[in-house]
Structures are given as C-alpha cells and as structure tokens.
Image (cartoon, rainbow, N blue to C red):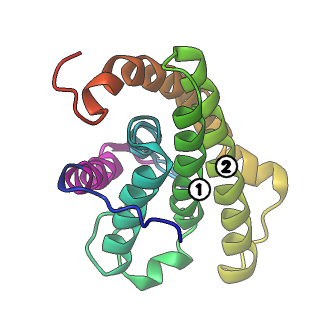
Amino acid sequence: MQKKKIIDVRGMVLCALFATLIAVGAFIKIPIPYVPITLQFLFTNLAGLLLGKRKGLIAVCLYIFIGLAGVPVFTQGGGPAYIFQPTFGYIIGFALGTWFAGLIAEHGTNSIKTYIIAGLLNFVAMFAIGLIHLYLILNFYLSTPTGIVKILSIGFLPFALGDVVLIIVCAILAKRLRPFIEKGKTTA
C-alpha cells in the first residue's frame, strides 16, 4: 500500500502565499485588448520552481478555485462565468505549466540552466492551452471570426519576449531562493 503524502503546515502556508502572489500578479498589469500583460507568469513559474510540481500545482489550483468561487482575483474579476473569458485558457495553462516546471525543477540540479529549461516548458504549456482557448472563445463563443495569425498577434507576440525575460529572472531567483524554501533550511 502506498503511503499518502500529506502537506505539512509550512507547505500549506507556502501554497497560500504563492496563490496570493499570483492574485497580486493579476493586478500588476498593462492593459491591452483581449489579453493584458501581467506578472502572473512570474509567480506561477516561481511556484513550480520553488515548491515543486505538487505544491506548485496546489498553489495555482487554489488561486483558480478562489477566482471561480467569485473572489475577483483574475485580471477581469472572478466567478464561474470567467471560464468564458478569452484569457481563461492562460489561467488553466498556468496550472499545467507550473506542474511541468516543478517536475523539471525537482528532478534537475539547482542550476540556472535547469530552471530556464523548466520555465520554457512552463511557457510552452501555458501558451498552448491559452492560445487554443482564446481561439475557441473568440471564434465560437463570441462569434468573432479570428484566424491563427491574428490569435498569435494578440495572444502570443506581445508577451513572448517579456515572458522569456521573466524565465531568466525566475531562474536566477530560484537558484538563490531554493535553499531557503527546502524543508529544514532556515539560512542559505
């Protein structure tokens, strides 16, 4: 029989902290049509890199559940109807991407290279789900015929360079902060 993994109080606090940071990141934004530029990717990526796949995913899912429950933590509010917002796919992509980043970070070395690879995988997962959802919502729910080139120009190109820079920033931060986060360490 497999032993159940229980998250200790410290892990719960870290999950809650990162869920809060992701929510704060939603409001540090540059508004542009359809998909605003935010710092959510920074905090979801750090959640995966620092907390690992399981706790990182829990932090992002906590953020998602709080938003879907009606607390206005998403960039344009909250509530169950938010799944029909063009940006909701990116939020789901945060969960999958954070899990992938955590998986790579857990099995790799505490190096900037490992964290950059993990961040790039997070980036790909988040944008894949986000762009598919954006396409489906614009074309089928909002009845706004939008081609692939337009989807890429509004949902990927404005963010790609900035997110790559954030991946590098996250890698540097994770290398420095990971010793503080690891269980039992109080100093680096």
Residue at (69%, 43%) from the top-left corner?
Answer: 124
Question: Which residue lies at the image location 36% right of the left edge and 44% below the top edge?
Answer: 29
Residue farthest to the front, as pictured? 1
Q: Quadrant of the C terminus?
A: top left
Position of 39 relative to 85 (above/below): above
The residue wearing badge 2 is 125
| Residue 71 position within the rendered picture, expressed as x and y whole percent measured from the top left | 25, 74
Mark pair 1, 2: CA separation: 6 Å
Find the magenta span and give its range.
11-31
Q: Secondary structure at mark 1?
A: helix
Specify whether residue 154 is in view.
no
Mark 1 and mark 2 lie on one chain; the one further toward the N terminus is 1
Q: Is residue 25 above or below residue 64?
A: above
Q: Residues within 10 Å of mark 1 (few under 14, many from 20)?
A: many
Does 141 sit left or right of 78 as displayed?
Answer: right
Residue 186 placement, left or right of 71: left
Tell me which residue sits at (31%, 72%) in the image.
66
Q: Measured along the vertical axis of the image, is residue 166 above or below residue 35?
A: above
Residue at the disc numbered 1: 96
Q: Position of residue 178 (x, y in %)?
A: 35, 26
Query: Does the magenta-highlighted stretch encompass residue 20?
Result: yes
Q: Quadrant of residue 137?
A: bottom right
Q: Taking 149 as reference, is 79 above or below it?
A: below
Would residue 53 be seen by someone viewing this image from the given angle? Answer: yes
The reply to whether the magenta stretch includes residue 142 is no
Nearer to us in this view, 97 or 36: 97
Overall secondary structure of the magenta section: helix
Q: Are marks 1 and 2 in contact (CB under 8 Å)?
A: yes
**Residue 85, how many percent across, how many down?**
52, 72
Q: Position of residue 161 (x, y in %)?
A: 60, 26
